[in-house]
Image: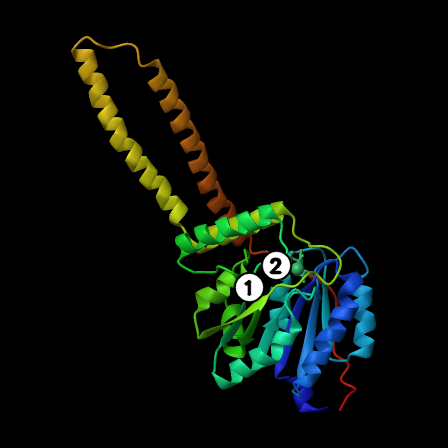
Amino acid sequence: MNRQAETPLISVVMPVYREGSSLRSVLDVLVEVLLSLKESFEVILVDDGSPDDTWVVIEQASMQYPVIRAVRLSRNFGKESAICAGLEMASGKAVIVMDGDLQHPPQLIPEMVRLWRESKADVVEAVKDDRGQESFVNRIGAGLFYSVFSRLSGYDLDRASDYKLIDRRVVDAWLTMGERNLFFRGMISWLGFRHLKIPFTVPERAGGQSGWSLFRLIKLAVTAVTSFSSLPLHLITLSGGVFLFFGMILGLQTLFNKLTGKAVSGFATVILLLLIIGSLLMISLGIIGEYIARIYEEVKRRPRYLISEKLERRVSEK
Ligand code: UDP
Ligand code: MG
């Protein structure tokens, strides 16, 4: 057995969900680029419980490309968990995480590898210079999320993508983070190390359709915010303080009116206060609830994903 085949220089981790129709051509492009590097590599595909023929396509492709290793998750665990499964499997000295729909162009890989080697960057991040074809709602939503996230957590993820080359040191550090609520981009930026950015333009999907509904995006955004910042909780305290301040002023005024015999009236004020305080309390409870939900999910300590099938590299090649 060839030792080099054991620990490749580069592992490409690709989470795939419902990509059956285009995966084959995506792999052809990817492998061609990787071969042109003239380095040892492996391709790790994580089938995130796709209901379509994605796994069959993977099995067939692995016949042609022995560099493919793959796992099939027992159900759809979401992209973040799928990336986690891939990172745990990867053995390369550098790991490249990319989408399986060619929206992260493989043509960028040689440049990423060059930067990693020559400038000793630990993380080479591909950042979107243009968010590509996206719906208006997605664009606004993403803009809002990134500005809130960076203000709350202090990590600027604007235009960041999951397309990254990560050095082994950073992968190992990432793997020590034990949380269940994963947010890959944020976690990588939390780790620190030396980051380099290269811009890219997001092309059209290679085929199939996006696996992200608006609801899932919102869920990911909430996970991201709650696991990277406790500021919303402090804001509740702060708003309580502000309300106390105004409450005191209003209280004094009411008392004064009462003493000078000018009481009654002020119905509108009462209703307004009731409504404002009522909704503020509800929102506050909701925010606290989000954090409790996260704590609950974390303390259960369930596995982050479950594997139902595995395809290891056939080490026949020398
Ligand atoms: N993906 C996944 N699990 C999911 C949804 C998506 O592994 O539940 C993968 C998908 O196969 C693709 C990547 O995550 O490789 C990005 O997904 P998609 O292209 O649907 O997202 P978009 O580009 O629209 O943000
Ligand atoms: Mg995509």
The residue lying at 38 percent from left, 49 percent from top is: 231
Mark 1 touches mark 2? (CB < 8 Å): yes
Tell me the kind of residue under disc 2: Gly
Where in the figure is residue 76, as x and y percent of width and height?
Answer: 69, 55
User: Would residue 54 be visible to someone looking at this image?
Assistant: no
User: Would residue 31 be visible to someone looking at this image?
Assistant: yes
Q: In this view, does 88 lie to the left or right of 29?
A: left
Which residue is the extreme one toward the left? 260
Ligand 1 contact, mark 1 (Cβ < 8 Å): no
The residue lying at 80 percent from left, 73 percent from top is: 61
Q: What element carries label 1?
A: strand
Residue 259 figure quarter: top left
Name the image quarter holding the C terminus: bottom right
Residue nearer the viewer, 250 or 78? 250
Q: What element carries label 2?
A: loop
The residue lying at 77 percent from left, 64 percent from top is: 22
Where in the figure is residue 2, as x and y percent of width and height?
Answer: 70, 91
Residue nearer the viewer, 151 or 199? 199
Where in the figure is residue 186, as x and y percent of width and height?
Answer: 49, 61
Residue 69 figure quarter: bottom right
Q: Residue 128, labelled with which disc? A: 1
Name the image quarter holding the N terminus: bottom right
Q: In this view, does 217 lie above or below 315?
A: above
Tell me how many marks there are: 2
Where in the figure is residue 136, as x and y percent of width and height?
Answer: 59, 47
The residue lying at 59 percent from left, 49 percent from top is: 138
Residue nearer the viewer, 304 or 223? 223
Ligand 1's quadrant: bottom right
Mark 2 is surrounded, within 10 Å at the Cα level, by few (under 14), some (14 to 19) or many (20 or more) other residues, namely some
Mark 2, residue position? 132
Q: Distance between the residues labelled 1 and 2?
A: 8 Å
